Amino acid sequence: MRKTTNTLKVAFRALARNKMRSILTTLGIIIGVACVVATIGIGEGARLQTENQLRSLGTNFLMIMPGSTTSGGARTGFGMANSKLQDADVEAIRREVGSVAYVSAATRTVAQVVYGNQNWSTSIQGGEVDWPLIRSWNVAEGQFFTDQDNRTAAKVCVLGRSVVTNLFGDEDPIGKIVRIKNVPFKVVGVLEAKGGSMMGQDQDDVVLAPYETVRKKLQGSTSVGTILASAISNEMVALAQEEITALLRQRHRITRGQDDGFMIRSQTEMLAQAEEQSKTMSYLLWSIAGVSLLVGGLGIMNIMLVSVTERTREIGTRMAIGAKGRDIRSQFLVEAVVLAVLGGSAGIGLGIGIQKIVAQVAAWPVSVQGSAIGLAFAFSAIVGVVFGFYPALKASRLDPIEALRYE
Amino acid sequence: MKDVNVIEIRDLTRIYTMGENEVRALDGVTLSIAKGEFVAVMGPSGSGKSTFMNIVGCLDRPTAGSYVLDGIDVATLDRDERAEIRNDKIGFVFQSFNLLPRTSAIENVELPLLYSGKHHYSDAEMRARAMACLEKVGLGKRWDHTPAQLSGGQQQRVAIARSLVNDPAIVLADEPTGNLDSKTSEEVMGIFQGLNEEGRTVILITHESDIAEFAKRILHFKDGKLVSDEVVKSRRRAEVHA
Ligand SMILES: Nc1ncnc2c1ncn2[C@@H]1O[C@H](COP(=O)(O)OP(=O)(O)OP(=O)(O)O)[C@@H](O)[C@H]1O
Ligand SMILES: [Mg+2]
């Protein structure tokens, strides 16, 4: 214990003697640790954001898309011969799959929406009457369009809260006419605000119109983009998935062993996939962090080696007046660790700052990870020990007589 | 006998081997130094003075021969044991002072206490001991000055204070006045004389015979051998005391 306090005293005094160098030495660690904390925090913030958005899809949510999956989960073979989903498929699911509560064909495009002299570029979603039930997203003002509107491809739409704000300001949008790709649409309702945003993308920045209208008036295509569905309960999600698969395989006349040509994603699976992606992302971030810590550590080693050479006479003097090899070794080791940990602490502060700024700019939740801070702290201490060890050993092995003579 | 002689040396030999060549830096030196003596070591360059001091100071080990310091046979001690002996029994004063730069006088003087294996001193005790030593060398008021703020003579006095702080059995000085002018040298020698009068054993190396005359006894080395060992008849007294 008393040795420890003396060693600390000696090391702190030595560091205080060389303040500027001590600060410069820690720069590498500061940047490395700031990197760790910021990237992990930012990555975590982005992951939370994705998760929030996926959760907002509704727990029983299912999405049927054309294409097929490889084992890795990547989509391939977009639009294969019999992969296109048909209007009749939507009808069939609605009619024949008992485990499904709601079904809606869905499509999306991006377009300018014009009201008076205001215009706003946004995402135009086409859906059927079940759409708000599937997404558990209600109308706050006015009403949703009807099945009749969809069948007749009526030019009506429901606006997301952000679109209202941008086009109408304080004005009441209900009953007003907006132009989308020069087609006039009557606003019949306003969606309730979902709040939150994703990767700088605002969920309320959306215009919802009948599926048939979007397809015929805005897109001019005939095949179904995706089908959204909702199982009657969370427990029924897997069953619904199975039943839909069986039904579509039969309808598309897909023989045994042949690829589906479509895929069904549940919210759970999408979450898992997002998790998987963020894992890959975090490996990347960790390796960046690792490299910066390595560089920071090498910086410390370099400066400590210079310091040992420069302070050869000091080491000789200390040895002459009774410092043992291990006293010298612990002094330099403690110096390295103190440098690394001080740098680490500064880096944690800097990292949190960077992360807050990024979170502010990208408008996603700040997620200061306690574990990241703990790890950054531990890692900087370990870096100090690992990279401080060799210089410290070198110092402790100096011959006192030669060290005293050193010029 | 043992408690009278601080240093007992017999047949002390130190051989440096450099490839084929052998340098007998010390060649069979036998002598003893009693407690309270003031010894000056002289001799031409390369005669083995520093080698002798390094062994006496337990920085180095003899190739052959025996060396008993304050009753302890130190010739066979290992590195760590010698470090302990140095801390406990020996005070070093160097030609180039060897103070830690950018470190206050008092912290420099405290340094040996930090490495003391025997005692653990509290901060206050360390301060008090270091302060007492600084006052002894007349630098009590300059305790917070760094070496850069002190003259050469003052720096050497800080170094002497540092050598005293652990209350050593002997004070060793290798050309302590080598970097000082004659007036400052005399001041420093005055301090050594003062210490010696308090009963402390002092051994110093010097090239200058007028410096050696401050001592009570002069050893002459030549080619690693002790060639003369005489008492100073007309001893000089330093005019200035601290
Ligand atoms: N580390 C060493 N390796 C080899 N030879 C050495 C070493 N140290 C000293 N010597 C040799 O030992 C001899 C004695 O050296 P020492 O340093 O003791 O002389 P000195 O009397 O102190 O000389 P000076 O008055 O110049 O300081 C010299 O010949 C020197 O070259
Ligand atoms: Mg010498």
Image: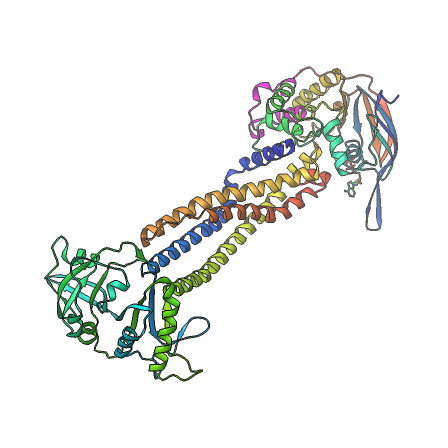
Task: Answer whether residue B160 is magenta in the image.
Answer: yes
Query: Which of A331 and B222 lies nearest the eye of the viewer?
Result: A331
In the displayed structure image, the side of residue A126 where residue B206 appears, left or right = right
Q: Nearer the viewer, residue B218 or A305?
A: A305
In the picture provided, is A128 more to the left or to the right than B113? Answer: left
Q: In which of the image's four quarters is ligand 1 placed?
A: top right
Q: What predominant SS class does the magenta segment belong to?
A: helix
Give residue A230's position: percent from left, percent from top.
31, 66
Q: Looking at the image, which is closer to me, A34 or A193?
A: A193
User: In the picture, which quadrant includes the C terminus of chain B?
Assistant: top right
Viewed as shown, does residue A257 lie left or right of B60?
Answer: left
Answer whether residue A310 is visible to the viewer in this image. Answer: no
Whole-percent x, y for residue A48 in the image:
38, 55
Q: Furthest residue to the front?
A: A98
Up-down relation of residue A196 to residue B86 (above or below): below
Give the image quarter of residue B126.
top right
Who's the residue at 31% across and 57% down the image?
A200
Picture coordinates of residue B241 (x, y %)?
67, 15
Scheme of colours in the image: rainbow
- The magenta-colored residue range is B134-161
Q: Residue A293 or A41: which is nearer the viewer? A: A41
Give the residue at x 28% y 64%. Answer: A134
Answer whether residue A182 is magenta in the image: no
**With A288 as the anchor, is B225 left or right in this view?**
right
Taking the spot 36% from the left edge, 64% from the top edge, the residue there is A267
Asked which quadrant contains residue A276, the reply is bottom left
Residue A220 in the image: above or below residue A398: below
- Asked if residue A2 can be seen in this view, the reply is yes
| Spot occupied by residue A275 in the image (x, y as percentages of width and height) | 43, 61
